[in-house]
Amino acid sequence: MKTSRIALALAVLAMGVFPVVAAPQLTAKIAEQHKIIRTDNFYGFDRTVFDFDGYEAWVVEPKGPAREGRPWTWTMQWATAYVPRTSVPKLLAHGYHHVTIITFKDRMNETGLKVSAKFQKYLVEVLGLAPKADLIGMSWGGFFSTRYAVAYPENIDKIYLDAPLLCFKDFDPATEKPDPRRGPWVESAPADGKWSADPRMPVNMADKLAKTGLPVFLVYGGQDQSCPAEINAIPFIARFKQAGGEKNLKVLYRAYFGHHPHGVEESDPTIVNFFEKPFVSTQKTQDLLGNQSNTVRK
């Protein structure tokens, strides 16, 4: 009998057939209300991809017990980009959950805000994650994160913004049309073309975000051509400070960085420390060689 079992096992391996990996713990719970699209491996961790009211969403689970309080990170856009550099695998290894919902078609307009809030309500009330999210906002994700945090500050723990898009470029309505890459925002573009004066732009919400008291870690590069610092990060930082938010702001300025790469070196603990440890405000400047000068404000 023992010999036959071994022979059977060898035959199965020879055919390339392997035992089915057990489904992630949350898959069955999610399947009670939503269609499962697939389960797979995400940087060594179990991921459940599912349909949430017509939007693709997913939850990645830590191995072993979840961290106390069941904290979680939420990459609001480009969730498969620069994953190790945004320290998501390290946080998963430390017991965090990780999620996303793909709302890019809405560009975090009023519909996007409502969908995102409903998604978070589901994560908290049904899946049992912590009441407040740790947001990761790269590029458009910075636009999403800021608007969402201002609309629902009670839902947020901390915010990491990386080369964030915080304002659309102004245009001359006499000779130009709104940039179609702005999605549904084109339908309500300002008549004078001045997005920079539009109160819906995250750059013009810096004061509101500052007054929430939420900790913000903002990384930006001096050579960013996609989201130029002079109309995005720089005015946002200034307005955030003017509104009294300096004590809740951590900035990393990288003079020779463009829009990419997002994040930090995988060996750099900065992002992990930001989410896991008590907040301390710092201003950092990184030179061409990666050396940093720090100013710490307690």
Image: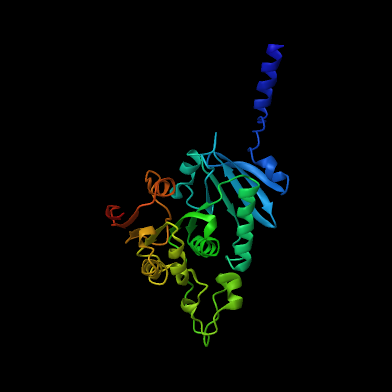
The answer, for residue 190, to whether it is visible in the render is: yes
Q: Count the marks: how many?
A: 0
Residue 47 found in image quarter: top right
**Which residue is located at x 59 percent, y 70 percent?**
183
Give the answer, above or below, for where 207 lies relative to 271: below
* Residue 77 seen in render: no
| Along the viewing direction, whichever of 244 and 271 lies nearer the viewer | 244
Q: Position of residue 104 (x, y in %)?
A: 59, 62
Q: Quadrant of the N terminus?
A: top right
Drawn side of residue 216 relative to residue 290, left or right: right
Q: Residue at x 44, y 48 (%)?
A: 275
Left or right: residue 154 versus residue 246 is right
The x, y position of residue 282, in whole percent, is 32, 56
Where in the figure is residue 159, as x and y percent of width and height? Answer: 46, 56
Quarter containing the C terminus: bottom left
Q: Is residue 189 left or right of residue 207?
A: right
Residue 30, percent across and down? Answer: 68, 45
Q: Which residue is situated farthest in the bottom direction here?
A: 174
The answer to whether residue 46 is above or below residue 260 is above
Looking at the picture, the colour scheme in use is: rainbow
Image check: 255 left or right of 10? left
